[in-house]
Image: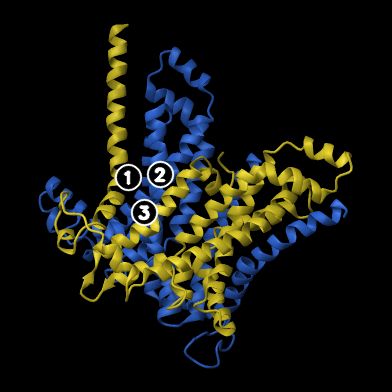
Amino acid sequence: MIGGRARRRLLEAGQVVAILAFIAIMLVPILWIALAAFKRHVDVYQLKLVFTPTFENFARVFAEPYDLGTKLFNSTIVATVTVLIAIPIATAAAYAFSRFRLRGQTLLLVVILATQFVPAVVIVLPFFLMFRDLGLLDTLTGLVIVNLAIVMPFAVWMIKGFIDGIPVDTEEAALVDGSSRLQVIRNIVLPMAAPGLVTAGIFCFIIAWNEFLFALILTSREAVTLPIGLALFKAEEGDLWNLMAAAGIIIMVPMFVLALLIRRHFVQGMTMGAVR
Amino acid sequence: MRDRTLKYLLVAPAVFVVGATAVWPLAESLRLSMHAGRLSRPDFPQGFVGAEQYAWAFLEQPAFWNSVGVTAAFTFVTVALTTLLALCFALLLARGGRFRSGVQSLLILPFAMSPALIGVSFRFMFNPEFGLFDAFLGRLIPGAADINWLADPTMAFWVVVIADVWGWIPFLTLVLIGGLASIPRETQEAAEIDGAPAWKVFRDVTLPQLLPVLAVVIILKAIFSLKTFDLVFMLTNGGPGDATQTLSHYVYFNGFKYAEFGYASAVAWLMVIPMMVLTYFYARFVFDRA
């Protein structure tokens, strides 16, 4: 018996070591970038762990010619407006899909699901031409429109999952008592679904914030977002790593906070309910 | 208002948005792909050419076949490696408890990183002069420190693979932990009591029950691998030469560097076809569970 316990303890120790090694590999690239953001230019080019930290890089990325503040503003506006448009629209559709049978419901749901898998390069070619004709190139409005394309399928499927989980009894009781369907939605469904809506909103915000290809092609000066801003630091004299790292921190840290807030629902969101 | 009318009013805005932002561009690229479309000329798009640009890609463009090969190899290798490693980590982490749950939470972080930033991060790590991985591998394998990773076609391909696998392992691991958690413990315990060794319990009891989740994970990862663009753009920009040029990058290059919109649309549509096949299988899994 003792032998069995010792063996089990050894096995557990081995597993803990393996887990620690694994998580170290997952975190080192992030930590290394984070460290570089606080290094002076000369320290970046050496594998130093001990160095005098500086905030100079952050000051420089916000100053001319990089002006990351504008990109931060653009990213925030685009992601926020995208979410504010997508979530109400998706909620209405998700409620209908969850509570009623519609003609062609399965087909509609499959089309919405499939939208997520259409390569972004396919979507961007016609939009480039349309925006060129409408004067929407390099505008935040244009970016919001194309970002809706990528967040919509996630939002509909995620919110449908949350509404599916709300029991219908209370709704039916209220309907019998003479409430209208819209009153039921406003007074019963929305309050109960609120945490789910916030979760879906955060999830879509992260996707829109990290979006790269649309912003790369459809913006040039005015409406440039943060991920595209990274390319500014690929200078003629080589990459300005410490500035790139500082910009990287500004891009990733807010998303880390948001992602940790909704970590339980991340998997469900990405797989659209195929895995719960 | 009657429910019968209301339900269609509720879905109408969403259907409109999806139609306008996804279905319309798909149809429009199909139309463009059949027209000669040089953006630099004023009479854009020029005349109808039917399937000529598709034939052009297949018959006259070695660069197209190169990007097909790169994308196929990249998809195969990243799907296999990510799934295999994620399965190992999921098995290590599935048991729960405070330590393992804490590690699971940390796994969200790489996944919340934008792929463009992952590209930057790995270019930094594999820099031959001061990259951390480069220095580390140099200690491990003599001579490895002298390799200029991103200048060598084969090595550059593997650096892109490593960066992609690194970025996707957390997500796949979390999905598989979810899958493992949904398997009833009793079946595994019964096999353990019968004296079956751990690997046999895994192979004969756990793995068969995990197969549906594994299938979902593999299809989903394959779809995302086929689309890969951001990472490649920031890490290698398709190079050296066209050694890491994926199909998405090839379309981008033809459309926006050479202004060949018709040809780019044709190649883009060739990407849509495998995507539709994969989506079909994916949708079947989603609806089987519903």
State which quarter of the image contains the N terminus of chain A: top left
Q: Are marks 2 and 1 in contact (CB under 8 Å)?
A: yes
Q: Amino acid at mark 3?
A: Asp
Instruction: In the picture, one chain is yellow; tell me its letter.
Output: A
Q: Residue at x 21, y 54 (%)?
A: A53
> Are discs 2 and 1 located on one and the same chain?
no
Alpha carbon distance from label 3 to label 2: 11 Å
Residue found at x 30% / y 18%:
A9
Given this view, does label 3 or label 2 mark the residue nearer the observer?
A: 2
Q: Secondary structure at mark 2?
A: helix
Residue B28 image position (x, y, % from top left) = 61, 75
- Mark 1 and mark 3: span between their CA atoms? 12 Å
Residue A202 is at least partly visible in this image = yes
The amino acid beneath tag 2 is Pro
For label 3, the residue is: B164
Label 2 crowd (10 A; few <14 / some 14-19 / many >=20):
many
User: Which type of secondary structure does the marked residue at label 1 adopt?
Assistant: helix
Chain B is which colour? blue
Residue bearing the label numbered 2: B170
Residue B156 x %, y %: 27, 61
Residue under numbered circle 1: A26
